Amino acid sequence: MRKDVRILLVGEPKVGKTSLIMSLVSEEFPDEVPLRAEEITIPADVTPERVPTHIVDYSEAEQSDEQLYQEISKANVICIVYSVNSKKSIEKVTSHWIPLINDRTDKDSRVPLILVGNKSDLVEHSSMETILPIMNQFQDIETCVECSAKNLKNISELFYYAQKAVLHPTGPLYCPEEKELKLSCIKALTRIFKITDLDNDGILNDNELNFFQRTCFNTPLAPQALEDVKNVVRRNMADGVKDNGLTLKGFLFLHTLFIQRGRHETTWTVLRRFGYDDDLELTQEYLFPIVKIPPDCTTELNHNAYLFLQSVFDKHDKDRDCALSPEEVKDLFKVFPYMPWGPDVNNTVCTNDKGWITYQGYLSQWTLTTYLDVQRSLEYLGYLGYSIVYEQESQAAAITVTRSKRIDLQKKQTQRSVFRCNVFGAAGSGKSGFLQAFLGRNLQRQKQIREAHKSYYAISTTYVYGQEKYLLLHEAIPDVDFLSEEELACDVVCLVYDVNDPCSFEYCAKVYKQYFIDSKTPCVVIAAKSDLHEVRQHYSLSPHDFCRKHKLHPPQSFTCNTTTAPNKDLYTRLTTMAMYPCCSSRFWLPLFLFFLHVFTLFY
């Protein structure tokens, strides 16, 4: 909501603009009225909406046209004052003032107008019969107020309506000609309905209605009040209430009713609580709360975030098969302004036999997004309403910023749950196969992946000494001379070569010697396509001799050309090396296998 409101009063001379301001301030009609009142500021604590309000007078005798134009451009709302006993001042509303204001304001961001009929004490009849056609003709007119500066009639109401026109405008919500909500308002309220519909059955039951009421207005509704609300909907539409719960149509009808009865603030309170600004767009502050990430630290989802995401999955997995069908994915993301996941996601995480993202794959994708682009993860959680459902100040409460990797190395332990492995290798060496095998796909399944849907990431879980960890594999570009900082920053490195290609290992040797020979990052050489005949490499040292010379583990044989899902032991070893880099010497492998064996015996 705006931090302050600026009200400008315009109109013909002698209609009582200055008198209205002075009567408001002094609460009595002034004996002497100056040509123009000085700008006054009403403090927030004495205004109904608790917002500082600036009231600006205009005098044709004291101000130039240029000064008037400047005030029009600065105003949040403009009151066009006319005298109810002066036809000329009423005619000037449409012949002069509205065209002048429209010429000086942007068409897409017109300021709301209030028509003010002053001097009602001088006549016994109302001017509303003349004013109503004007209100119907000009959409920017919020309302009309008849008042009297002399006997203080409707003075406070006038400025309250002006303030309300700024803080709770009708324009973005409602089309008076059609007598229905605008599409942008329907879209926003539909998202709010879907977030509040915690079980995704298309109906707000009493518990969900009370959750909505507490969220927006900090108080639940009494049982009778809930019934009264539903009865109002029942009397006005056939399908607004179903199974004693409020349908989307009924929810939208209630907000239409609020607006038609002049209670715009109710709908605006709801919209703002769910993150919307005056243009019915989610605010940057709501979508992108500040998360400070020091150097050498990573971002992960915390326990509450995973619980929330699990509840989102459960409410959309309607057939309870622990996977999301394309229709279920589409339904889940209806609260987004766009589809955030493309077909590459299905090749980044685990899927079932139908190619649908499994529960584990779903959580893995969220983990990947949070690790690689925490701002995007915050945005997505914002669309889903995390901070609202979990009653947090912002989505930032869902994020854990890990401690510096340098401290982890010093203490020889880590509290992180996500570890990154960058996979290097010459073109055709088997990097993509290595990534896809981690997701349980053998060569036959990999051949079904379209090139356009290929992913350069793969993420899934592994278990290290009974602890569930995420391993994120990233296929680096094969250009050895142009590796970015992102491609070098990781917890463990895989150097993949094709045992059947004599030129393949040279690339691995170059990458290691150029970037990792003096690094503390553990490195593993992968002898890919081990089901094929192994040929001698055209490098000066054989892969085994190279590893021996540089105190690396011997090359690890790997193939994805299997009849079943490829073995995952190698990925567990990589995760362990990432967790305990100081223990990743060439003697680590037998020790790891020993401890793994012991752990299996006891657990």
Image (spheres, rainbow, N blue to C red):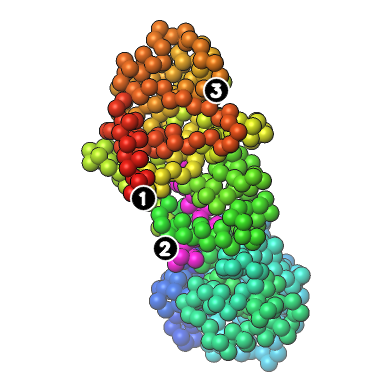
Q: Which residue in the structure is indicated by mark 3?
A: 531
Dots 3 and 2: beta carbons under 8 Å?
no
Type of secondary structure dominating the magenta stretch: helix
Q: At x 76% / y 79%, what residue is drawn? A: 238
Q: Position of residue 377 (x, y in %)?
A: 49, 49
Extreme residue in the front direction? 601
Q: At x 43% / y 54%, what residue is drawn? A: 289
Q: Which residue in the structure is indicated by mark 2?
A: 393
Which label belongs to residue 349?
none
Q: Is residue 89 left or right of residue 391?
A: right
Among the 4 quarters of the image, the one containing residue 525 = top left
Among the 4 quarters of the image, the one containing residue 127 = bottom right
Q: Position of residue 275 (x, y in %)?
A: 52, 62
Instruction: Tell me the magenta residue range.
Output: 370-391
Q: Amino acid at mark 3?
A: Asp
Q: Is residue 568 left or right of residue 416?
A: right
Q: At x 62% / y 86%, what residue is drawn? A: 227
Q: Nearer the viewer, residue 300 or 222?
A: 300
Between circles 1 and 2, the one closer to the viewer is 1
Q: At x 62% / y 53%, what residue is drawn? A: 324
Q: Which residue in the structure is indicated by mark 1?
A: 603
Q: Amino acid at mark 1?
A: Tyr
Q: Earlier in the sequence, mark 3 or mark 2?
A: 2
